[in-house]
Image (cartoon, grey):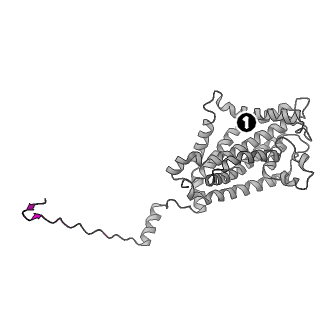
Amino acid sequence: MVTVDESGPSALPAPPTPLNRTYSPASVSAAVEKNKLEQIGVRPRLGTYFKELWASRAFIQVLATSKAESENQNTYLGQIWSLLSPIMNASVYVLIFGFLLKIGREGIENTIAFIVVGVFMFRFFERSVMAGAHSLNKNMNLVRSVQFPRAVLPTAGVMAELLMLGPALVVMCVISYLSGFLPIAGKVTIDWYWLLLVPAVLLLWIFSTGCAFMVARWVAMTPDLDNLLPHFMRILMYASGVIFSVDRYLGQFSWGWIVEYQPVAVYLYLVRSSILDEPSYPPDGFMWLLGVIWAVLFSVIGFLIFWGGEERYGRD
């Protein structure tokens, strides 16, 4: 209690001396090691980052499943659009390029099955790349509020596309097989080669994930690239033989082998050689080797590119 006398207020008590707490580097390191603390805003080591991503498998599955289930949820037909969209796209290309212009029929016995397979598989790749491009920007609130390896987002985006591809593959195979009964198309027989469709799709999935890592980093750093991606994908579609035979039209040029052996064209070749009876697309061990090489190369490089910007995501 402060008293006041004739001479004025009494002097206030002096504040206590602040505690001088010092920690040795050894004690700090021991506390960090004991509690497994990590510095915020710093890119983790590559091995640690990969372990954290692997430990987030359940999180990836939940994100992928929720994204796949929410696709087209505000429409009357819902998930049916995942099947109708590629069917309608393939029908347009078959009509225009296969029957009106007759471009897709050069060197191909079953134009319908050829274009259907190309459209379905390229659509999966294209949507996977676009999912990776939007994975960070569309989840910025999650990126800024929760600590987790950001590679979860493009990985989950591509996995969601893979989940939606499953029913589409069944429709693609059915259309390809039934088209063989038409008098204007070559036969499509069911044999053990159809089993090769599974590893072909898995290789394409791994390759697409690597591409998603790359574009996720680039679009996060330079958002303007998001407007250029659709145009690049359109060029890539025509350069990959989605609706016509690459070997038939470009094989005569000295640089044609570049287009024929680029990754997307290789995976289209693998899928077509698995389920179609096209003489120009026989099973080829060299193409399978290229498919493995492209998948490993792009997945590793893409992961390293994405990891290189880990500490900047959500901060720029």
- Residue that mark 1 sits on: 168
| Left or right of 72 on screen, residue 235 | right
Residue 185: give x, y in percent of width and height. Answer: 90, 33
Q: Residue at x 66, y 32 (%)?
A: 79
User: Where 237 falls versus 53 (above or below)?
Assistant: above
| Left or right of 248 on screen, residue 22 | left
Check the picture and name the quadrant holding the C terminus: bottom right
* Front in this rendered view, residue 155 or 144: 144
Residue 183: give x, y in percent of width and height. Answer: 91, 29
Residue 8 within the segment the image draws in magenta? yes
Residue range of the region highlighted in magenta in the rendering: 2-20
Q: Residue at x 80, y 37 (%)?
A: 116
Q: Residue at x 91, y 56 (%)?
A: 254
Q: Is residue 127 visible?
A: yes
Look at label 1 and name its amino acid.
Answer: Ala
Q: Is residue 188 visible?
A: no
Check the picture and name the quadrant holding the N terminus: bottom left
Which quadrant would residue 191 be assigned to in this image? top right
* Front in this rendered view, residue 83 or 227: 227
Residue 101: give x, y in percent of width and height. Answer: 89, 35
Q: Residue at x 73, y 36 (%)?
A: 168
Residue 290: give x, y in percent of width and height. Answer: 80, 54
